[in-house]
Amino acid sequence: MKTEATHWADITALKIIREKGDKQLYVCAAGITPSGTVHIGNFREMISVDLVVKALRELGKQVRFIFSWDDYDVFRKIPANMPQKEMLETHLRKPITVVPDPHGSKESYARYNEYEIEKLLPLLGIEPEFIYQAEQYAKGCYTELMRQALINKDTIKAILNEHRTSELPPDWWPISIFCTSCQKDTTKISNWDGEYAVSYSCSACGNNETLDLKRAQTVKLFWRVDFPMRWSYEKVDFEPGGKEHHSAGGSFDTASSIVKQVYNHEPPVTFKYDFIRIKGKGGKISSSTGDVISLQDVMYIYQPEIIRYLFAGTRPNAEFAISFDLDVLKIYEDYDKCERIYFGREDVSEKRKQKEKRIYELSQVREIPAALPEQIPFRHLCNLLQIYEGQIPATLKALDAEDDTRLQSRARCAWNWITTYAPPEFRFHLRNAEAVPVSVTENQGRAVTALYRELDEKFSSHDERSLAESIYNLAHEHGLEPKEFFKTLYRILINKEMGPRLAGFILTIGRDKIMSLLTPYVS
RNA sequence: GGGCCGUUAGCUCAGCUGGUAGAGCAGCAGACUCUUAAUCUGCGGGUCGAAGGUUCGAUCCCUUCACGGCUCACCA
């Protein structure tokens, strides 16, 4: 039993129970429009709900975690990162589920964007029940609720007008219609009979028609109304919202009024989450250039647990940056430290300990490890992988590490980082022993020869410290400044002037390899 | 114009339901005749944006103000 909840996910869970009462089932919802690549900022919506769901379940509650894809939205503009722009151009104003996938792999534009992230979520332990709005509308799930909105048109209008600078026009309706002929939403409603018949005319193709709401599959609610309608339909108890929805007059505000006045349902518990910034991914990052950062991009560098850790460890209403630069090392170190704290291997204040422990628990993709997992510092992994040229099994074997999924995943991320984002100082290639030797002076050659002999005799008895000492001594014995000797050795090993801390590096490279690399210089 | 959020050590930030402040980095000193933001050890009196108020007592509550940022108001 925990003393008091201090983590935001637990606090929110308790708040939901307090405000919604003791229920058999709690509904927690997330929703995103797949009108383009789902980016890491959108991901905050999913993970935020996931963490709250987790907290509720740990309190012994039954929870339904729903995720609504707002894929009956209209295709308004073409994101810069999409191929086949001319083709897409011809589909503007149609529902995104009708627009073809420009990549040609999925049944629609919307589906492509949905799938790109749906396939990744289970890897992060996020497994919601997906609801596809286009499908829901098509199935007629919302017919009655649409009619209710039509009946309450004036109420809705008044609510929306409260915060508008210009009033909605007299002929405004809370629904919009995709023309059955040209599929575009370039339609104007001309009449509603008070029951289920809605007439419209299409300005694009000139189509005039009267639809039956009970049969029609192309009518939908205006987004600010769709939102509260869904709260009512799914009986949503909790849904967070991005900051763009959370100010006075924003969609949460109007949706709350509408759900109460039109649908006779209480709005869900909510909180606001802030945006995610990106750091260290050089140059163009704005969505206008279409260079959005997706979850996949982040997973390329960060293990699943660490992605969860980043979000679980930050209050939702605080903005934070996801880094691709040197900060990556620090983030991995922070996570490892958090893990050590969880397993009591690190002395910290009780308060800190409680805090970190909860964050650690929430960061786990599945069950919490029973004992401290083997930790291999990210930085070290980066060096080893370069020695083994990116071969993960060989690297883990050299480490005598368990070949488990966590370490594999970390190794993959480390290699990805090294090859894509790491600064040049971090990168190296071991030279090939058969390559033409670099040139060394006579003195340098003698020192290298001495080192060769030293290693030949005592490689296995050296540790980093003793070997470092030997290197110094050898330098002096042969009249070299240590710095010069270091440079010489780095050139011989990796053809650079600097590299990883030398003694440890030599030991890591391993006896066989180091001997073969030094051999050409032995006189 | 409305709303929200910030303003805490040089920098980045922690500080839960009030009991006069902390961590990392930087810095300084020392150690190691090393180098991948190098490692180890030691060192943290900063009017907690300003002014009022509530309180025995406020960084943490209330009010007002200043500065900074974000967001809504057109479309989804």
Image: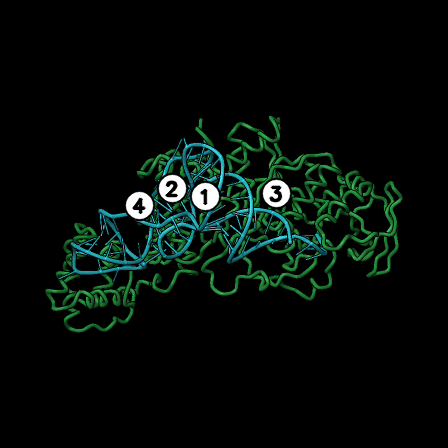
The amino acid type found where label 4 is placed reads Asp
Task: Relative to A436, say whether A332 is above or below.
Answer: above
The residue beneath circle 3 is: A30
The residue beneath circle 2 is: A338
The amino acid type found where label 1 is placed reads Gly
- Circles 2 and 1 in contact, beta carbons < 8 Å: yes
Label 4 sits on a secondary structure element that is loop
Of tags 4 and 3, the one toward the viewer is: 3
**From mark 1 to mark 4, how far is it between C-alphas?**
32 Å
Q: Colour of chain B?
A: cyan
Q: Residue at x 38, y 42 (%)?
A: A338
The amino acid type found where label 3 is placed reads Ala
Q: Chain of mark 3?
A: A
Return the mark for residue A313: 1
Figure chain in green: A
Label 2 sits on a secondary structure element that is helix
The x, y position of residue A316, in whole percent, is: 52, 45
Depth check, front residue: A174 or A69? A174
Q: Is residue A56 left or right of residue A136?
A: left
Which quadrant holds residue A271?
Answer: top right
**From mark 2 to mark 4, how far is it between C-alphas?**
24 Å
The residue beneath circle 4 is: A400
**From mark 3 to mark 1, how far is it between C-alphas?**
20 Å
